[in-house]
Image (spheres, helix red, strand yellow):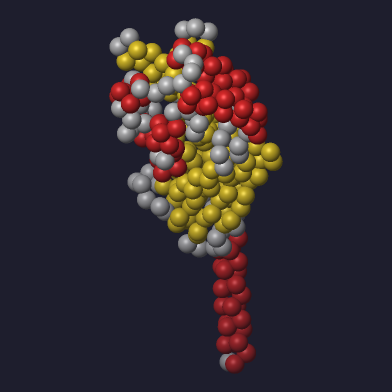
Amino acid sequence: MFKFNKAIHLLLLLLLFFIWGCEKEEHTQPTDFNLFFEIDDTPVMEGKLTIESILISLGSIEIDGRREVGEDVFMTRDFGERKIFQLTRYLPATPVNFNLPQGIYNPLYFLLNFSPDNEEAELDDEFDEWIEDMQHGEKEIEELQEDLGDIIEDYLDGVMPCIMMKAKYQRNDIYYNVVFALNDPLLFRVKGMNEEGGNQVTLRKDRINNGVILLDPSYWFSVISPSILESAFIGVIDDDDKYIFLHKKVNSQLFTTVYNRLAESAVLYINE
């Protein structure tokens, strides 16, 4: 009888180890996860500002995921020097593919490390000279607009900053090109959300899991009125192309207003 009970006990232990092993294996199984970047299609400034494209430059993406069962997940996708993503209103950028352990995450964070373009430094002297001319007030406004236009043209031709938004602004007979350019080191910490807006997201190995990070220019410009935007100093290219350039050295107050709303507006929807 003792030997029989001992055998039963041993079998139960083996069964428990087998079940535990299976559970452990299940929670270490990799899943396919595709991370997309898209532009939110909410009208910007009541439709007066039309977004044409948004460029983002990343050095790496870090993942910080806390799982309810299984080990937490910490990993980094390093892009080397930098990786450029070009988003338009109609075409999302090529996704970034990951293999993540399946399971229930609560929460799951993606940290976007933006990578500046060192080429911008080559324009420092031009920026500084233009700012000095503005402060001295010796040049006519038309000449200052043309000088700024030259800088903008050089910037668009030679610099791919951390974030660059290109847009068109139109109200009645007023028409401008609008460029927002940010080239300082930047970190976005974006939390994954489920279809109900909660923090708990589930990744399963039996399907392809998708996440979409939405960039929301409507929120970026939500506190900027048409009159404020139209009061910006403009640059002129080829005599008639008028540009509002939002940069830390040009129209800096408007630039700061947009900059302060960038990170907090980014959202990540998973498996909607």
| Frontmost residue, 218 versus 6 | 218
What is the quadrant of residue 93 in the picture? top right
Residue at position x 47%, y 26% from top? 135
- Asked if residue 267 shows in the view, the reply is no
Q: Position of residue 46 (x, y in %)?
A: 30, 24
Residue at position x 48%, y 52% from top? 108
| Frontmost residue, 119 versus 126 | 126
Q: Position of residue 175 (x, y in %)?
A: 38, 13
Q: State the residue lying farthest toward the top.
A: 239
| Frontmost residue, 192 versus 147 | 147
Residue at position x 53%, y 26% from top? 132
Q: Quadrant of the N terminus?
A: bottom right
Q: State the residue lying farthest toward the right.
A: 80
Q: Position of residue 52 (x, y in %)?
A: 46, 21
Image height of 103 relative to 242, above or below: below
What is the quadrant of residue 115 in the picture? top right
Tell me: 174 left or right of 30.
Answer: left
Q: Position of residue 144 (x, y in %)?
A: 49, 17
- Asked if residue 63 shows in the view, the reply is yes
Tell me: 25 left or right of 240.
Answer: right
Residue at position x 38%, y 28% from top? 41
